[in-house]
Image (cartoon, rainbow, N blue to C red):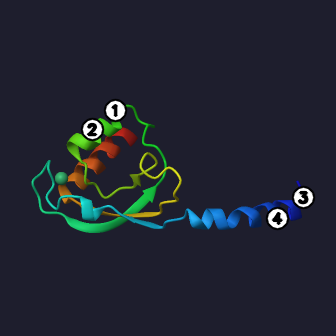
């Protein structure tokens, strides 16, 4: 493929990409402000988002939902927003969830 063909292809699809691009998704308004696991009061923060699917570690979703649902790490929203490019997510963050999340990954990466 020549460069000019590549560029014309990009130009043709650019409006579509931009139409489906949402940089920040706000999930905080439909969340509770108290962590159901640790009973702590949470703050709304903007964390990294991605439209990937979190199936890369078997059992991760179950552990995350039960032990650290409100961590500060990247949120994977592919199931909820399959056609949207999500870069940041506004969510409630629990500091105890975040610590459990970091411990989980530190143990796996060591
Ligand atoms: Zn928590």
Say which of marks 1 and 4 sits in front: 4
Q: Nearer the viewer, residue 96 or 50?
A: 50
Image spot of residue 1 (x, y percent) = 88, 53
* Position of residue 102 in the picture relative to residue 33 (left or right): right
Instruction: Tell me whether the residue at label 4 lies in contact with that at label 2, contact meaning CB atoms closer than 8 angstroms.
Output: no
Q: Nearer the viewer, residue 17 or 33?
A: 17
- Residue 92 at least partly seen: no
**From the viewer's perspective, is residue 81 above or below residue 24?**
above
* Residue underneath mark 2: 63
Say which of marks 3 and 1 sits in front: 3
Q: Secondary structure at mark 1?
A: loop
Say which of marks 3 and 2 sits in front: 3
Classify 10 Å Cα crowding around label 1: few (below 14), some (14-19), many (20 and above).
few
- How far apart are the alpha carbons under marks 3 and 2? 48 Å
* Position of residue 85 in the picture relative to residue 31 (left or right): right
Q: Which comes before the other along the chain, label 4 or label 2?
A: 4
* Residue underneath mark 1: 59
Image spot of residue 14 (x, y percent) = 69, 66
* Residue underneath mark 4: 8
At a point 82% along the width and 60% down the height, the residue shown is 6
- Quadrant in the picture for the C terminus: top left
Residue 2, picture quadrant: bottom right
- How far apart are the alpha carbons under marks 2 and 1? 6 Å
- Residue 3 at least partly seen: yes
């Amino acid at each position: 493929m020549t460069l000019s063909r590549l560029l014309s292809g990009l130009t043709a699809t650019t409006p579509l990409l931009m139409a489906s691009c949402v940089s920040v998704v706000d999930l905080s308004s439909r969340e509770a402000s108290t962590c159901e696991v640790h009973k702590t009061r949470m703050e709304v923060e903007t964390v990294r988002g991605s439209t990937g699917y979190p199936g890369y570690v078997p059992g991760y979703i179950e552990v995350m939902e039960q032990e650290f649902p409100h961590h500060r790490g990247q949120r994977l929203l592919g199931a909820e927003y399959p056609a949207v490019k999500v870069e940041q997510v506004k969510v409630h963050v629990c500091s105890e969830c975040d610590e459990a999340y970091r411990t989980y990954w530190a143990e796996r990466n060591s």
